[in-house]
Image (cartoon, rainbow, N blue to C red):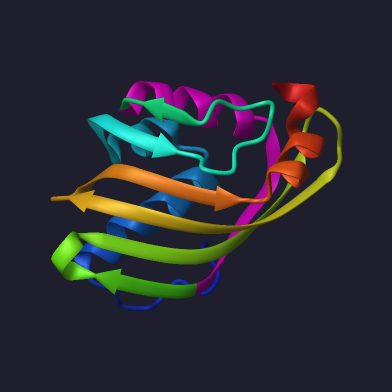
């Protein structure tokens, strides 16, 4: 259950929230289906353990599968939802929290996700997060 998700949302916001719902459920097939086949996941402030972008739904899902498959108690909290219908864009400010299975460490991160929606799928995700925090926590599993 994504904490703070609006009880009723536009179709575009629901598509963006699918990112959180499928990851919390560990449903990587549904996660991959959220993205267009040529989608781009950009990480402008990427950590040294991650490339700056992933291209294609399959590559995006493979990266998240690698990072999240062994997480426990994964939970996202939505703080703000902003939409720009003219640009087919949804901007979510959210935080995530989980236990990293490989190390048992608690991982907490704050994010801003800029989701470009193409119909009922994400064609571009620009995800901003603290790269130092990510690097420190994810180094053992990359």
Q: Is residue 124 above or below residue 117?
A: above
Q: Which of 141 and 44 is in front in this view?
A: 44
Drawn side of residue 120 relative to residue 39, left or right = left
Residue at the extreme front of the image, as rendered: 44
Position in image of residue 30 (x %, y %): 35, 37
Position in image of residue 10 (x %, y %): 23, 71
Residue at the extreme right of the image, as rendered: 104
**Residue 57 picture quarter:** top left
Count of picture labels: 0
Drawn side of residue 69 relative to residue 62, left or right = right
Position in image of residue 6 (x %, y %): 40, 77
- What residue do we see at 86% from left, 37% from top? 104
Magenta segment range?
57-79
Q: Which of 47 and 103 is in front in this view?
A: 47
Q: In this view, does 32 lie above or below 23?
A: above
Q: In this view, does 16 lie above or below 85?
A: above
- What residue do we see at 76% from left, 43% from top? 132
- What residue do we see at 39% from left, 64% from top? 91
Drawn side of residue 62 relative to residue 130, left or right = left
Q: For residue 120: magenta?
A: no
Q: Which of 2 and 123 is in front in this view?
A: 123
Placement of the C terminus among the 4 image quadrants: top right
Drawn side of residue 9 relative to residue 71, left or right = left
Q: For residue 64: magenta?
A: yes
Position in image of residue 12 (x %, y %): 23, 62
- What residue do we see at 47% from left, 53% from top? 20
**Residue 141 picture quarter:** top right
Q: In this view, does 138 lie above or below 86?
A: above
């Amino acid at each position: 259950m994504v904490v703070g998700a609006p009880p009723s949302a536009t179709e575009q916001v629901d598509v963006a929230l699918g990112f959180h719902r499928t990851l919390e459920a560990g449903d990587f097939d549904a996660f991959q289906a959220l993205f267009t086949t040529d989608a781009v996941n950009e990480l402008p402030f990427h950590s040294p353990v991650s490339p700056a972008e992933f291209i294609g739904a399959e590559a995006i899902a493979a990266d998240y599968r690698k990072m999240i498959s062994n997480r426990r108690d994964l939970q996202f909290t939505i703080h703000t939802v902003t939409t720009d219908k003219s640009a087919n864009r949804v901007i979510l400010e959210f935080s995530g929290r989980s236990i990293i299975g490989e190390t048992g460490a608690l991982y907490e991160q704050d994010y801003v996700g800029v989701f470009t929606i193409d119909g009922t799928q994400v064609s571009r995700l620009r995800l901003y997060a603290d790269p130092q925090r990510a690097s420190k926590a994810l180094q053992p599993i990359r």
